[in-house]
Image (cartoon, grey):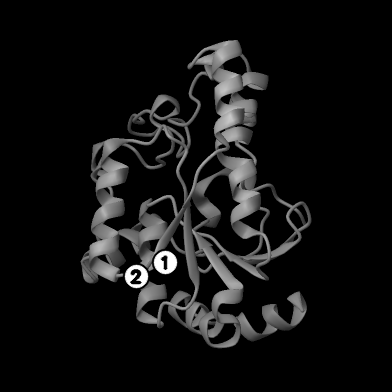
Amino acid sequence: MIDHLRASLQGLDAAQIIQYITDNYGNRAVFSTSFGIEDQVLTQLIADAGGKIDVFTLETGRLFPETYYVWNRTLERYKLPIKAYYPQAALVEEMVTKKGPSSFYESIENRKECCFIRKIEPLKRAIQGYEIWVTGIRAEQSANREDMDFIEWDEGNQIIKIHPLFHWTLNDVESHLKQFNVPYNHLHDKGFPSIGCQPCTRAVAPGEDFRAGRWWWEDKSKKECGLHVTSK
């Protein structure tokens, strides 16, 4: 199946990829948005293609106020339902009771535990039963992702992942936002290229790595939460 999909999608632009998925898979495909600029581009393309691809977001409980604002603006603009997946309350309560609300700063193990509870476990529920998972990943976003392809098999989640913006540059994304007047998170204008949970995200200085502002207290090689693990 994945080889057939790769052949069918090869050479198509992002809008054509989204249209193909819409026409051939409909709501058997799901798109995960964190309301970053790449995801906002894809939301607009999904709406323009007919809005049949299901859309969800992970509501970790630690998001920026600006993220909630662009979430509302996105709903108003595109009229697409965006299903919110929350972490299991019992798991959050147990973690915070035992380790406090900021345990993720104390060790990589604690941070990964928090990411698992707030993001990984809800993600597995969100994509369960779907055949295709659409993401906003771009190849240039981090060194760890340069070895990925625009379509791949996610062994851990048993799902095909498609990245329609895989070959886009940051300039491509920003130009698209302006051309189509796509609502976006204005933290991007304040030095936040990657926006996640508020306690784990800071602005980056000019010349810093794209993901330097995520989990900035950790070694660079450890800076993934596990949502997108390369699997060839």
> Residue 122: which quarter of the image?
top right
Q: What residue does disc 2 label? A: 44
Residue at image location 29% in from the left, 60% down from the top: 74
Give the residue type that dot 1 points to: Leu
* Number of other residues with Cα within 10 Å of mark 2, as a class: few under 14, some 14 to 19, many 20 or more: many
Residue at image location 38% in from the left, 30% down from the top: 198
Q: Residue furthest front?
A: 90
Give the residue type that dot 2 points to: Gln
Give how far across and how far down residue 130 sits, in percent: 65, 68
Cβ atoms under marks 1 and 2 closer than 8 Å: yes
Secondary structure type for disc 2: helix
* Number of other residues with Cα within 10 Å of mark 1, as a class: few under 14, some 14 to 19, many 20 or more: many
Indicate which disc residue 169 carries.
none
Indicate which disc residue 42 carries.
1
> Residue 61: which quarter of the image?
top left
Give how far across and how far down residue 174 sits, in percent: 30, 59
The answer to whether residue 11 is seen in the rendering is: no
Secondary structure type for disc 1: helix
Vertically, is 137 above or below 204?
below
C-alpha distance separating marks 1 and 2 = 5 Å
> Residue 210: which quarter of the image?
top left
Give how far across and how far down residue 25 sits, in percent: 60, 81
